[in-house]
Image: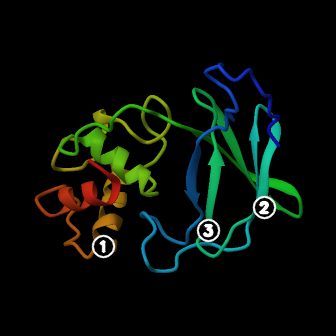
Amino acid sequence: MTPISRLVNDSTAHNTLNQPPTVPIFLQMSPDAPQDDVRGIMGVSFQVLINGSVVQSGTTPQDGRIDVRVPPGGSSTLQLLVDGSAVADYEITVETGALDPANQVRGQQERLRMLGYQIGSDGPDGNGVNAATADAMNVSNGEFERALLDFQADQGLFPDAIVGKQTRPRLVSRAGA
């Protein structure tokens, strides 16, 4: 629980609670943003750590959603637990900058990654996002191509691994402009 301190009435922070913002994380059986279908993985035990201290714990509901608190400018660690022991750790950070344009490879990779499609560990941050791995229309990176084909198949689009006039708008509508 966050301690509360009362400041004098004319203080700009009078009765203000500073809680880190939350980031929704979905544990799902398949990628893409949650829709009306049931993809969530229910009953997974988890805990969230900030600076090594547990700040949240519980089990996932039917939709698999965990609202992870992430301090501004910092990170949190989401641990998945089995019998009380961590079996997987995920570092959660928040980037506040805009996405690259959807007509650029890096912007396409960012959107696929946001939707949960795995595009490898390439790139300067090891997050799979690297504009040098492919040109804008014909994908040459195998993992990016596979993710793009999976996205197209999931969306009922013709799976050709090309971010063209049908795929690009769908990618933007699912992940943002």
The residue depicted at 19 percent of the width and 58 percent of the height is 169
The N terminus, quarter of image: top right
Left or right: 57 in relation to 175: right
Answer with left or right where residue 135 lies relative to residue 47.
left
What percent of the width, then of the height, locates residue 39?
A: 52, 75
- The residue lying furthest to the front in this view is 9
Q: Are marks 2 and 3 in contact (CB under 8 Å)?
A: no
Which element type, helix, strand or loop, lies under badge 3? loop
Q: Residue furthest left?
A: 165
Crowd class of label 3 (few under 14; some 14 to 19; many from 20; radius 10 Å):
many
* Residue 101 x %, y %: 22, 39
Q: Tell me if residue 40 can be seen.
A: yes
Mark 2: amino acid: Gly
Q: Amino acid at mark 3?
A: Gly
Residue 16 falls left or right of residue 28 = right
Q: In the image, what residue occupies the spot 64% across and 49% down?
A: 68
Residue to which mark 1 is pinned: 153
Which comes before the other along the chain, label 1 or label 3?
A: 3
Q: Secondary structure at mark 2?
A: strand
* Residue wearing tag 2: 58
Residue that label 3 marks: 64
Mark 1 and mark 3: span between their CA atoms? 23 Å
